[in-house]
Image: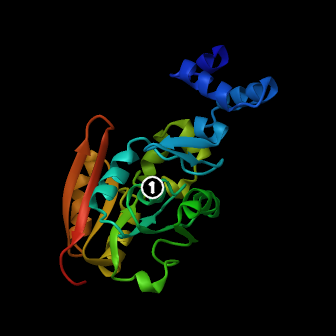
């Protein structure tokens, strides 16, 4: 614990307990503490993250699911009827897809990511629960028969403006893939691409859900409205989370 505290770990005591429970013995514990003290995300060190009551496997170099994203996953679950067709784009570890499979009776869930390492990780989290994971850019790898039928579309797109990426905590900046963080000049480049495709892939009345920041809300709402989606903004102050729920109300 002393090494963790000296390295600047704010929750050193809790992290030490977790590392002790994850290590097979003193030698492995020492190595894990060393890796954490060197700046690796805790989830990369232990190999998993707690997310919405599930244990999600997290490989090194893969985007770590944030606790605030539990709000996004929870709202997706609330909107999904039993048997709903759901998609998790920019899925990373597949945490949202796993929550949908665990929480929505009979849900058909597909997930996709452009990062090969994320896809390998997501397959271990999603496919044993009955979902499917694809590698590719946004909608490109999805089966064509899903077009116009998706009822709940979760897209945890990157939304950090390019100029702000160097300001991120070192854990994210140095150990997570840039493609999962950098959203372009204003942070909304990937969202605009998702919104353009969503109008075609969503079923009538289907919902697109994504996370954003408070300062980007107006621009994000405008981005989805430009493609015929009616948006509302939801916030969770406890999780410091802001999401947009955009609904397809007309044919594309």
Establish if 92 lies above or below 64: below
Q: Residue at x 52, y 77 (%)?
A: 141
Q: Is residue 159 left or right of residue 28?
A: left
SS state under label 1 = helix
Establish if 235 lies above or below 20: below
Q: Is residue 214 left or right of residue 33?
A: left
Q: Residue at x 46, y 85 (%)?
A: 144
The one nearer the camera, 101 or 59, is 101
Q: Quadrant of the C terminus?
A: bottom left
Establish if 9 lies above or below 47: above
Q: Quadrant of residue 123?
A: bottom right
The percent position of residue 31, horizontal first and vertical second, equals: 76, 29
Label tally: 1
The figure's colour scheme reads: rainbow
Q: Quadrant of residue 188?
A: bottom left
The percent position of residue 112, horizontal first and vertical second, equals: 51, 68
The percent position of residue 116, horizontal first and vertical second, equals: 63, 64
How dense is the environment of label 1, judged by Cα within 10 Å: few (below 14), some, or many (20 and up)? Answer: some
Q: Residue at x 28, y 56 (%)?
A: 78
The one nearer the camera, 6 or 126, is 126
Q: Is residue 56 left or right of residue 82?
A: right
Furthest residue toward top? 2
Furthest residue toward right? 27
The percent position of residue 181, horizontal first and vertical second, equals: 48, 52
Does any portion of residue 156 appear in the rendered image? no
The one nearer the camera, 176 or 90, is 90
Q: Quadrant of residue 227?
A: bottom left
Q: Residue at x 62, y 58 (%)?
A: 124
User: Which residue matches tag 1?
Assistant: 102
Does any portion of residue 64 appear in the rendered image? yes
Q: Quadrant of the N terminus?
A: top right
């Amino acid at each position: 614990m002393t090494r963790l505290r000296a390295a600047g770990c704010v929750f050193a005591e809790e992290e030490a307990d977790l590392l002790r429970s994850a290590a097979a013995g003193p030698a492995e514990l020492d190595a894990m503490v060393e890796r954490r003290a060197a700046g690796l995300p805790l989830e990369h060190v232990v190999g998993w993250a707690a997310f919405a009551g599930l244990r999600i496997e997290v490989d090194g170099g893969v985007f770590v699911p944030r606790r605030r994203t539990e709000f996004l996953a929870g709202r997706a679950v609330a909107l999904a009827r039993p048997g709903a067709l759901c998609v998790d784009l920019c899925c990373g570890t597949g945490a949202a897809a796993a929550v949908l499979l665990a929480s929505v009776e009979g849900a058909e869930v597909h997930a996709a990511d452009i990062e090969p390492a994320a896809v390998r990780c997501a397959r271990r989290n999603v496919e044993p629960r009955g979902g499917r994971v694809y590698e590719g850019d946004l909608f490109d790898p999805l089966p064509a028969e899903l077009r116009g039928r998706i009822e709940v579309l979760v897209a945890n797109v990157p939304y950090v403006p390019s100029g702000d990426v160097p300001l991120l905590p070192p854990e994210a900046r140095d150990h997570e893939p840039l493609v999962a963080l950098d959203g372009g000049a204003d942070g909304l480049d990937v969202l605009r691409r998702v919104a353009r495709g969503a109008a075609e892939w969503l079923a009538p009345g289907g919902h697109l859900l994504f996370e954003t920041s408070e300062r980007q809300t107006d621009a994000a709402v405008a981005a989805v409205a430009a493609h015929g989606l009616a948006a509302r903004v939801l916030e969770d102050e406890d999780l410091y989370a802001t999401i947009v729920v955009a609904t397809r109300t007309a044919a594309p």
